[in-house]
Image: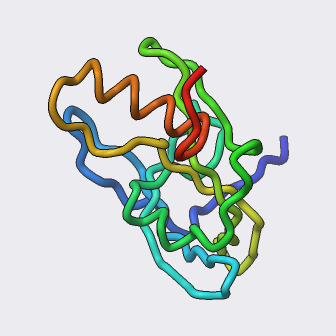
């Protein structure tokens, strides 16, 4: 019987998690202005969405932010979570792909958690200055 032999070209690097390590990829990301940012992204095989970024990193891509109507919402135990979404380009293995990058649409929470949380979500989902429904 004839078989094939597969030889790995390279292996994933691993980052240290709270309990277990997880694989990471080094990826070049470009915003729509053509500026480059190199990041290490954790590989999550159970998620088929966009690239999730922290708020500070996401601001680099804000130039390509989609209109509010196109932002995605994810259902969580705490209720719907709106995500700011922007277009970007990822370079991996010498190939470029158009991707979406996201960050949770949240503001810093201060004072009473319940009051600021409800204000925060309504201002994010309805837009600044709009009155919540």
Q: Residue furthest right?
A: 1
| Residue positioned 27% across, 18% down in the render | 114
Colour scheme employed for the rendering of this structure = rainbow
Which quarter shows the C terminus? top right
Classify residue 57 as left or right of residue 98.
left
Q: Quadrant of the N terminus?
A: top right
Q: Position of residue 129 (x, y in %)?
A: 53, 44
Q: Is residue 123 left or right of residue 113?
A: right
Residue 111 location in percent, x, y?
15, 31
The reply to whether residue 107 is in sight is: yes
The image shows residue 113 at horizontal and vertical percentages of 22, 24
Residue 53, x across and y down, in percent: 46, 54
- When the figure is inspected, residue 37 is found, relative to residue 112, above or below; the finding is below
In the figure, is residue 82 to the left or right of 13? right
Of residue 99 and residue 62, the one placed in the foreground of this image is 62
Q: Which of the pair 132/8 is nearer the observer?
A: 132
Question: Is residue 45 in sight in this rendering?
Answer: no
Please tell me which residue is depicted at 49% across the width and 18% down the height of the picture: 76
């Amino acid at each position: 019987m004839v078989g094939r032999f597969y030889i790995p070209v390279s292996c994933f690097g691993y980052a240290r998690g709270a309990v277990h390590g997880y694989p990471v990829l080094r990826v070049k990301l470009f915003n729509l202005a053509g500026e480059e940012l190199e990041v290490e992204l954790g590989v999550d095989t159970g998620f088929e969405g966009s690239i999730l970024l922290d708020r500070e990193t996401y601001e680099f891509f804000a130039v390509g932010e989609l209109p509010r109507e196109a932002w995605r919402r994810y259902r969580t135990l705490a209720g719907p979570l709106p995500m700011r979404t922007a277009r970007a380009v990822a370079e991996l293995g010498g190939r470029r792909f158009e991707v979406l990058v996201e960050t949770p649409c949240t503001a810093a929470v201060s004072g009473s958690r319940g009051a600021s949380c409800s204000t925060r979500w309504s201002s994010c989902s309805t837009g600044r200055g709009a009155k919540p429904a």
